[in-house]
Amino acid sequence: MSTKSGLTQRLAIVAGFEDPTVSLEQYRTPPELAAHLVHTADLQGDIEDRTVVDLGCGTGMLALGAALRGPTRVVGLDIDPDPLDTALENERKVASTTNVEWVRGDATDAPLRHAEQTTVVMNPPFGAQSGNEHADRAFLATAAAVADVSYSIHNAGSREFVESFAGDNGGEVTHAFGAEFELPRQFDHHDADTQVIDAEVFRIDW
Ligand code: SAH
């Protein structure tokens, strides 16, 4: 297993959204946070020899992080074809040994079925700014349907919601950690140059 900082370095090359769509909440997860999530998952035995599905993969940050850590298969799913083109270019740059299958589709109505040994990783739209509170709920529902374990990034203050959603759907939150990340100035509603988001990451055993 490479180190977490080694993984961060390899992910630093992953390009973000060229022309982000506000309503889809498109922003790239910072390499440090992606590496932390994937490294933690790997230490838990949730990456190696497993299928990893990235719901709302964007330009591929989480999928590519997983691909650098010995999974049997990686699928990246996004509703928007534009970032998937960038994801393919990112895959070439990262040069992982495991190929990623990039699929265009709706993560809330996923063309996936439950399979054994499947880990979902995701940084879904939060819905907080668009007034579409808990847009992440439908992504969690898909994780519950297709995976036995998931790692998901949510906005701060989501713990109660995530724990109760997991409990209602046969899951349990086993790990939680906080993370801060900077959003580049790319959306109109951000008035500062950068905005720091307080996020929370949860591991759910489904
Ligand atoms: N996972 C990437 C991108 C996060 S941004 C990263 O960590 O860098 C959220 C992503 O979810 C965007 O790429 C957006 O296009 C995608 N998305 C939003 N709604 C979606 C839906 N219903 N189905 C699939 N993808 C969706």
Image (cartoon, grey):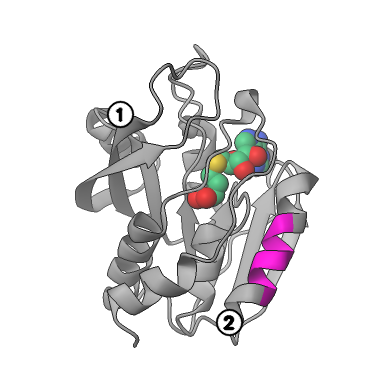
Q: Which part of the image, by quadrant, shows the N terminus?
A: bottom left
Main secondary structure found in the magenta portion: helix
The residue wearing badge 1 is 161
Q: Is mark 2 within 8 Å of ligand 1?
A: no
Residue at 55% x, 24% y: name it: 187
Give the crowd class for mark 2: few <14, some 14-19, many >=20 residues within 10 Å.
some
The residue wearing badge 2 is 96
Is residue 187 shown above or below 165?
A: above
Q: Which mark is residue 193?
A: none
Marks 1/2: CA–CA distance: 35 Å
Q: In the image, what residue type sits under mark 2?
A: Ser
- Find the residue positioned furthest to the front: 193
Residue 73 on image: x %, y %: 61, 77
Visible residue check, residue 63: yes
Q: In the image, what residue type sits under mark 1?
A: Phe
Specify start and end residues of the magenta stretch as a single range: 86-92
